[in-house]
Image (cartoon, helix red, strand yellow):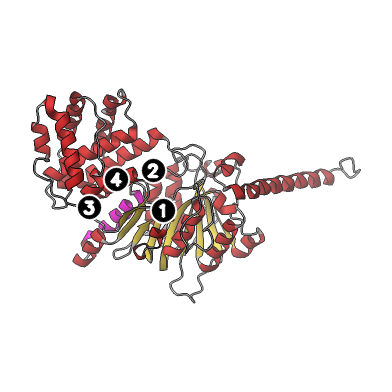
């Protein structure tokens, strides 16, 4: 984020204190800023993306006397909700209501936004600033399982290694506020000089596909895309695990980037095409299967999942076997505990490809695991998460499909390859550790489905028994008299 963007985030966030005393939550505050920033941009940027109804311009709001300002603002929101002339306006202002109670408070918010030059030349600056506000909101609200703002360094690292290209369809089936879609779009637009007019049009209107189920988050998503100049016709509000997820617009994606929700889902998926995970009562397994099915032949994906996806039995085991048999699960990135704002969450990134042809032999023959979690992995050469991600990008290599030459002797021993045969000997359990790590049993149980809890307990019991047997064997080898039994 640029210095100007950071300064703007700090300035706008400090104003939240004006509303906090009235009991306004952080998400409500960000939504309020969304309304005001949109009014400012739509009125003064003049980029043709939206047209404001008569009387709803920013200048009209500025010119309103203080004592009438709050009432006028409410009228504007109501009018925009009923007469919006573009899809983005319809999304942002549907059921829009202000949480501001005092005209003087609204005036200070309006003046703070009005001081900034929100013109098209600073599109990236204000887009970055808005993302900064979303990150601030995530940090402060500390939402529950699955409701996360994916850290920007992780998003950028994933996009960096998968290298989305002009003309590719890029999907996020759990788009949140749009971090992955925007980062992929930014990476492609860096090739601006190389894009044809047709490629530019495709990138703006059709390349990015996303779904978000929470209406307030969907509002923020559309605003974030708007600020970054994205006018995609394929951004949907709804549940990917419903019939919407099987819509043709959400199939045949060349690149899938996603941090799906995880934890108990409150019910089984209504997707009839999810043959392996349809009856799962957690989010994570059905979302992984969606990504597998939505990926086009020759496509590549990166999906963030909790630890239990790597080891649980039943449907989880069958899903992993299918993934390694019909796809190329070439890389797993083990993420540090607590990088999301709900502390203690243990996650990984699965990187996999779909063969270009049904008969193409690109099934998994080995999986590389890069461990950023174990304390011993960072004892040498940089301790920060960003440093670790930078090393992962280097280790991953220049091939977006994960087939560049790799080494087990670099990166402080944190990068290792496990053959398909070795994984099969573990009953396709991919929870593989080889560096010193504290095993946090409770955190794994947190995201397991009720019918998978036994599998988690069993795995830990077996691990404990194995360690006990090893200790007994070691003691017996030093006890020729047989004193230890």
Which callout, 1 or 3, points to the residue nearer the camera?
A: 3
| 452 to the left or right of 93 | right
Q: Secondary structure at mark 4?
A: helix
Q: Position of residue 226 (x, y in %)?
A: 23, 49
What numbered label is drawn on residue 21? none
The residue lying toward the viewer, choosing from 222 and 412, is 222
Q: Main secondary structure of the magenta part?
A: helix
Q: Earlier in the sequence, mark 1 or mark 2?
A: 2
* Secondary element at image label 2: loop
Residue 219: which numbered mark, if any?
A: 4
Q: Residue at x 21, y 61 (%)?
A: 193
> Which tag is nearer the camera, tag 2 or tag 3?
3
Cα distance between the residues tagged 2 and 4: 15 Å
Q: Which mark is residue 149?
A: 2
Given residues 353 and 306, the one toward you in this image is: 306
Residue range corresponding to the magenta coloring:
179-192
In this rendering, is residue 353 above or below 432? below
Residue at 25% x, 63% y: name it: 202
Label whose residue precedes the other's in the sequence (1 or 4): 4
Residue 319 in percent (x, y) is at 55, 60
């Amino acid at each position: 984020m640029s210095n100007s963007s950071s300064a703007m985030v700090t300035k706008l966030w400090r104003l939240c204190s004006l509303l906090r005393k009235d009991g306004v939550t952080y998400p409500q505050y960000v939504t309020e800023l969304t309304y005001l920033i949109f009014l400012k941009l739509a009125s003064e940027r003049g980029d043709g993306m939206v047209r404001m109804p008569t009387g709803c311009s920013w200048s009209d709001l500025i010119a309103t006397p203080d004592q009438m300002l709050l009432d006028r603002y409410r009228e504007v929101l109501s009018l925009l909700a009923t007469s919006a002339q573009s899809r983005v306006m319809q999304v942002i202002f549907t059921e829009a209501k202000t949480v501001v109670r005092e005209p003087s408070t609204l005036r200070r918010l309006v003046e703070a936004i009005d001081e900034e030059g929100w013109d098209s030349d600073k599109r990236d600056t204000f887009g970055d600033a808005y993302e900064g506000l979303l990150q601030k909101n995530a940090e402060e609200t500390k939402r529950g399982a699955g409701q996360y703002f994916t850290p920007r360094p992780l998003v950028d690292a994933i996009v960096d290694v998968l290298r989305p290209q002009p003309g590719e369809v890029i999907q996020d089936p759990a788009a949140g506020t749009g971090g992955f879609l925007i980062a992929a779009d930014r990476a492609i637009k860096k090739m601006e000089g190389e894009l044809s007019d047709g490629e530019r049009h495709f990138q703006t209107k059709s390349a990015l596909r996303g779904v978000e189920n929470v209406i307030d988050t969907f509002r923020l998503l559309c605003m974030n895309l708007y600020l970054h100049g994205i006018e995609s016709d394929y951004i949907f509000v709804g549940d990917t695990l419903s019939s919407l997820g099987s819509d043709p617009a959400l199939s045949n994606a060349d690149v899938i980037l996603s941090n799906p929700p995880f934890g108990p889902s409150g019910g089984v998926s209504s997707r009839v095409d999810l043959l392996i995970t349809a009856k799962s009562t957690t989010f994570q397994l059905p979302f992984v299967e969606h990504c597998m099915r939505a990926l086009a032949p020759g496509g590549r994906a990166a999906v963030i999942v909790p630890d239990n996806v790597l080891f649980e039995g039943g449907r989880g085991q069958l899903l992993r076997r299918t993934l390694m048999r019909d796809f190329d699960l070439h890389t797993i990135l083990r993420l540090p505990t607590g990088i999301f704002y709900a502390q203690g969450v243990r996650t990984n990134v699965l990187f996999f490809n779909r063969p270009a042809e049904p008969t193409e032999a690109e099934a998994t023959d080995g999986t590389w695991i890069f461990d950023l979690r174990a304390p011993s992995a960072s004892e040498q050469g940089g301790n920060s998460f960003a440093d670790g991600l930078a090393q992962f990008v280097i280790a991953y290599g220049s091939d977006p499909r994960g087939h560049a030459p790799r080494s087990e002797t670099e990166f402080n021993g944190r990068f290792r390859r496990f053959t398909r045969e070795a994984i099969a000997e573990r009953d396709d359990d991919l929870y593989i550790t080889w560096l010193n790590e504290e095993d946090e049993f409770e955190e794994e149980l947190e995201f397991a489905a009720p019918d998978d809890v036994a599998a988690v307990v069993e795995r830990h019991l077996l691990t404990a028994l194995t360690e006990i047997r090893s200790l007994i064997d070691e003691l017996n080898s030093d006890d020729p008299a047989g004193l230890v039994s």
